[in-house]
Image: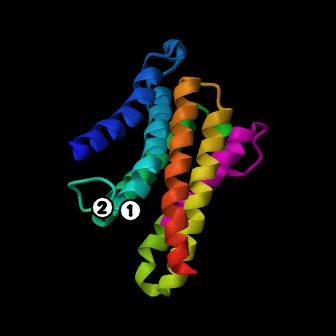
Amino acid sequence: MRNALIWIALCAIVIVPIALAAGSPLLAWRDPIYILAGFAGIVGMTLLLVQPLLIAGALPGVHGRRLHRVVGIGLVVAVVVHVAGLWVTSPPDVIDVLLFASPTPFGVWGALSMWAVFGAALVAILRRRLRPRLWRLLHIGLAVVIVGGTIAHAILIEGTMEIASKIALSGIIILINISVLSKALRRVV
């Protein structure tokens, strides 16, 4: 029963913000590629909840560490789809964001998070070439930047994500990540 409740809670936490965003009246004026880009961002954000749960072994019935790698690849893909879709709809805005020249603060946080995601993926690829302690510190540090930057990015955007579910999802992501990452960090130092 406990295992079923864990999966039901996780599904609800992931599905509710996506479903509410799908019902946003702001979608009526958007091109399909822009909508795809926006939902890739939302999916990427939900993966920030799944990743620490996998590494902590908190999801029953799955091999968490192995699936952590797969979900990490999914996060990279979500970021690429998010940015590429926005590039198609407005290249000048994306260039400004990538150069940290955007007049909107959410753009700076988005770019910071994107580069941290790519950095974490690179560190994961190089894991066997790095000392275990250094690898862990780098990966945890980048995870903190990813989570903090993504949440700042999402909260500052007034878009299709409904505000209450966005704040609730952000709070849960922060709590789970603090819990898991602080335990992982204690093992390193």
Position of 158 compared to 101: left or right?
Answer: left
Residue closest to the eye, 15 or 188 = 188
Q: Is residue 137 magenta?
A: no
Give the structural element (helix, strand or loop) at label 1.
loop
Compared with 141, 1 (above or below) is above
Taking the spot 25% from the left edge, 53% from the top edge, the residue there is 60
Kind of residue at disc 2: Gly
Residue 33 appears in the figure: yes
Compared with 126, 103 (above or below) is above
Between marks 2 and 1, how big is the CA–CA gap? 7 Å
Q: Give the percent coordinates (x, y) of residue 8.
A: 29, 36
Q: Which residues are magenta?
A: 96-120
Q: Is residue 98 magenta?
A: yes
| Residue 56, numbered circle | 1
Residue beneath disc 2: 64
Kind of residue at disc 1: Ala
User: Dot 1, how many residues are within 10 Å of its Cα: few (below 14), some (14-19), or many (20+)?
Assistant: some
Q: Give the percent coordinates (x, y) of residue 121.
A: 47, 65
Which quadrant would residue 128 be assigned to in this image? bottom left
Q: Give the percent coordinates (x, y) of residue 13.
A: 41, 35
